[in-house]
């Protein structure tokens, strides 16, 4: 019944749209400089409703302009030009009779902008929308001269864990760029964001509880980074380059950069972004395992890595006319890394404090991650508030891992205690993702916005692992550990939502999404087939109350699902060190979360919220031990329940004085992990502080601090961690150029430390020391104009976010 109702509503909206009345409206005028009366060519003229940009154009060489639009209710025209103060002209519905001539419009020079790096904000830095929080990066002082990763850390509720994963209120989220999933996580995503010039970012949307329009997958929500586009004709863009150095017994170096170019004319807009990266780093993992009977196993994996990557994104929009827009988006990545052990890697087994056996381990590997995503899109604008967008996507991912390990066993006298283990593995994973979706929106009764859509997506993976062991100098295939695994998944979805500004103070949005999933996993080498077929309903509701301009209240509730990603489903065994391995699980089930949030916004700088999340079938890593040898197998499994109830408080761009600006995020929560007889409760806290000092024009000093208390993660207990960093920044050439020098983790306190709570072993601890302390020197330059305009809802391949390589 739900499906039939959604289909009927979608058909009804589409029919209403076909008969929607259309009316042409031409707005004309001329833009001049107030001081001398000279014409201003290429000024930006845009027509806005209360919620969005409706149309835009630029002035001719003589300053005149002609803006074609569709008649609407109360709206306003905004005229802007770099170095001049913006001018806004309000137009009421009563005054709209035929065409509109605004006459001559004079712009005054904004002398503060011309002579200083400090830009006076024209819109609030933080805007509380009904179903999301928007950080207007282009209006924030402290974000100038920063990269995308630095800016993201300042967003309310956002933090980054030691593995490079982006967290929102302590929960992992999907990171999108211009309405399209980045499909990256961990180190790959960190590298991309670190190499992206912050000047190319316009807004950051924090969608903790995505509406029914979005896929229900992802427990932590979505962070959408909107890059700048350009209304003005011609070329604009930015160039950025960074050098990175760290020290751990020897020098580790790296570099990354970004080139962004945007070109716009009367009929099209094209943007190209290229981001190369290379860096060397290290990782030291120390473990202590208590095996009982006074036996202790000490392990050390000291590994070096060389990583390289090339990211390319090309987007093009063709404006056939004001009602029809065609476009395509192509994104691709070529990345790879090589790794090897430093001398000293291995383990020592002690009994009653006496060395019983010593293992020397030599490991090396190669890891390639390559993909290409293509998107074709079309937008049809039928009438005021009515819009249909079609998206067709295809993505191909190729992941190759090669691994060699040699382990040699001797007692304290140098005698061989068991047969040496020498093996190699070669795995390849090919993933194809196809997706089609149609989204339609229509405004009815002038105040109710309806959205409806359909989607179908298919994901197929082909996995092949070859394991070979060395016997007497020859290689022999290990049939027990070699494996073939194929996986196919189809997801069909329908959704509908409605939003309304019930009064000047109260707004409401609600929706329902239905998703049907059919999955088939064929473990060929184990002669095992597993299938899953299920349908879920995902309701969402948002209520907003704004009693006055200084207060904002919000209430939201949603149900989310997290399907296992393709790496977690893959049953192949990947070795982390001589005594530890990681294995997927084709029988994993999805996890489901009930989430709610009650928020309060005070003026434009302060946000306070009460958040709750209650998760079942939590997808988590489960440890298994061989008590005789100390070998550890970490396998993906459905753990049980992971629940939290907490409070988040954020201060964004608060000017304590004209030379001191502060950003801070604080999150405290009560966490509970429960599975069968296992039940652990913990208090969790997390804090971030960024203080930006502006001693004089064009100079900035940033002090950054982060702290995270311990928290339960399934059977594991993650111990506290934190860091303090410092950055010096200088802008030049009217703020178009920036030079920065940053020192991360000054006191080298950012490290991962884990203890095991499981009673299956007497005790286990892990200490991970990696390249957290580093020096980064960055130079960036912007050129051309860069005015933001409305983003189209195109290129949303959500399934790609389930492709990942980080552990």
Image: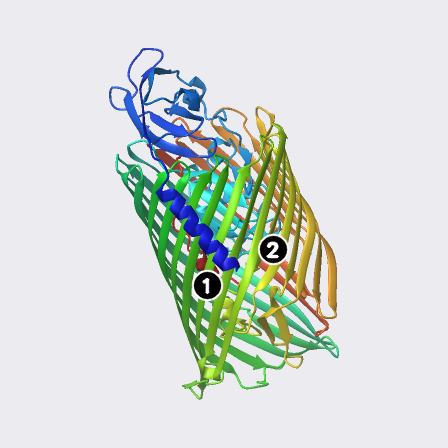
Q: Position of residue 542 (x, y in %)?
A: 59, 44
- Where is 130 relative to 561, above or below? above
In front: label 1 or label 2: 1
When the figure is inspected, residue 334 is found, relative to residue 78, above or below; the finding is below
Which of the two labelled residues, at mark 1 and mark 2, occupies the earlier sequence position? 1
User: Quarter-wise, where is residue 626 in the image?
Assistant: bottom right
Please indicate whether residue 543 sits to the left or right of residue 71 in the image: right
In this view of the protein, which residue sits in the foreground, 103 or 627? 103
Horizontal arrangement in the rendering, residue 77 relative to residue 135 (left or right): left
The x and y percentages for residue 573 are 51, 75
Q: Is residue 394 something one can see in this rendering?
A: yes
How many discs mark residues in the rendered view?
2
Which element type, helix, strand or loop, lies under badge 2? loop
Instruction: Work out which residue is located at the far left of the displayed protein and give it.
Output: 61
Q: For label 1, count other residues whose C-alpha is less than 10 Å away and answer few (under 14), some (14-19) or many (20+).
A: some
Residue on which the image places disc 2? 751
- Residue at 28 percent across and 17 percent down: it is 39
Q: Residue at point 64% right, 49% down?
A: 596
Check disc 1 and report the residue beneath it.
491
């Amino acid at each position: 019944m739900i499906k039939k109702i959604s289909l009927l509503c979608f058909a009804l909206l589409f029919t209403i749209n076909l008969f929607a009345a259309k009316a042409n409206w031409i707005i004309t005028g001329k833009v001049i400089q107030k001081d001398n009366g000279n014409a201003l060519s290429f000024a930006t003229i845009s027509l806005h409703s209360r919620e969005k940009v409706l149309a835009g154009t630029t002035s001719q060489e003589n300053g005149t302009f002609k803006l074609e639009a569709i008649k609407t209710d109360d709206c306003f025209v905004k005229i802007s030009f770099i170095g001049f103060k913006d001018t806004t002209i309000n137009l009421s519905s009563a005054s709209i009779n035929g065409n509109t001539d605004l006459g001559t419009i004079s712009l005054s020079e904004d002398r503060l902008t011309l002579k200083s790096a400090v830009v006076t904000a024209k819109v609030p830095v933080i805007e509380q929308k009904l179903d999301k929080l928007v950080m207007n990066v282009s209006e924030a002082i402290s974000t100038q001269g920063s990269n995308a990763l630095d800016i993201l850390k300042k967003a309310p509720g956002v933090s980054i864990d030691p593995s490079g994963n982006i967290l929102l209120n302590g929960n992992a989220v999907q990171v999108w760029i211009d309405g399209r999933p980045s499909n990256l996580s961990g180190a790959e995503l960190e590298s991309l964001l670190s190499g992206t010039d912050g000047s190319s970012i316009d807004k950051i949307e924090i969608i903790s509880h995505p509406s029914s329009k979005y896929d229900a997958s992802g427990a932590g929500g979505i962070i959408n980074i909107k890059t700048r586009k350009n209304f003005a004709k011609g070329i604009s863009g930015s160039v950025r380059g960074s050098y990175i150095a760290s020290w751990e017994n020897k020098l580790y170096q790296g570099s990354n950069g970004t080139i962004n170019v945007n070109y716009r004319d009367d009929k099209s807009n094209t943007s190209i972004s290229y981001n190369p990266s290379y860096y060397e780093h290290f990782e030291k993992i120390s473990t202590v395992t208590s095996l009982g009977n006074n036996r202790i196993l000490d392990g050390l994996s000291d590994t070096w890595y060389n990583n390289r990557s090339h990211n390319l994104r090309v987007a093009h929009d063709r404006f056939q006319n004001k009602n029809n827009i065609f476009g395509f988006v192509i994104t691709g990545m070529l990345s790879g890394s090589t790794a090897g052990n430093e001398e000293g890697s291995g383990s020592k087994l002690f009994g009653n404090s006496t060395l019983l056996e010593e293992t020397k381990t030599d490991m090396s590997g190669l890891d390639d991650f390559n993909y290409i995503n293509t998107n074709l899109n079309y937008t049809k604008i039928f009438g005021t508030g009515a819009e249909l967008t079609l998206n067709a996507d295809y993505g191909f991912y190729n992941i190759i891992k090669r691994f060699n390990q040699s382990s040699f066993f001797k007692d304290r006298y140098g005698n061989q205690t068991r047969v040496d283990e020498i093996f190699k593995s070669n795995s390849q994973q090919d993933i194809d993702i196809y997706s089609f979706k149609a989204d339609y929106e229509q405004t009815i009764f002038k105040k109710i916005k309806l959205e409806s859509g359909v989607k179908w997506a298919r994901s197929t993976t082909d996995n092949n692992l070859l394991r070979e062991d060395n016997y007497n100098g020859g290689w022999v295939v290990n049939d027990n550990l070699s494996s073939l695994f194929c996986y196919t998944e189809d997801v069909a979805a329908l959704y509908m939502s409605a939003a309304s500004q019930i009064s000047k103070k109260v707004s409401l949005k609600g929706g329902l999404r239905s998703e049907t999933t059919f999955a088939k996993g064929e473990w060929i080498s184990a002669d095992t087939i597993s299938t899953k077929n299920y349908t879920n309903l995902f309701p969402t509701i948002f209520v907003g109350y704004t009693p006055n301009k200084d207060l904002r209240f919000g209430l939201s509730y949603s149900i989310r699902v997290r399907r296992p990603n393709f790496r977690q489903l893959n049953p192949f065994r990947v070795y982390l060190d001589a005594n530890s391995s990681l294995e997927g699980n084709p029988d994993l089930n999805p996890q489901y979360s009930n989430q709610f949030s009650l928020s309060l916004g005070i003026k434009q700088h302060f946000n306070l919220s009460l958040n709750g999340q209650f998760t079942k079938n939590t997808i988590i890593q489960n440890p298994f031990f061989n008590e005789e040898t100390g070998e550890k197998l970490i396998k993906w499994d459905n753990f049980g329940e992971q629940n939290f109830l907490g409070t988040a408080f954020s201060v964004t761009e608060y000017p304590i004085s004209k030379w001191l600006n502060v950003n801070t995020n604080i999150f405290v929560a009560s966490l509970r992990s429960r599975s069968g007889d296992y039940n652990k409760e913990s208090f969790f806290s997390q804090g971030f502080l960024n203080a930006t000092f502006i001693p004089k024009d064009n100079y900035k000093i940033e002090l950054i601090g982060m702290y995270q208390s311990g928290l339960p993660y399934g059977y594991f207990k993650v111990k506290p961690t934190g860091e303090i960093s410092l950055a010096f920044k200088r802008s030049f050439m009217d703020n178009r150029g920036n030079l920065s020098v940053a020192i991360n983790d000054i006191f080298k306190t950012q490290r991962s430390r884990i203890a095991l709570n499981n009673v299956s072993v007497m005790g286990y601890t892990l200490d991970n020391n990696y390249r957290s302390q580093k020096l980064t020197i960055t130079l960036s330059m912007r050129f051309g104009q860069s005015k933001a305009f409305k983003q189209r809802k195109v290129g949303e391949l959500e399934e790609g976010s389930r492709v990942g390589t980080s552990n």
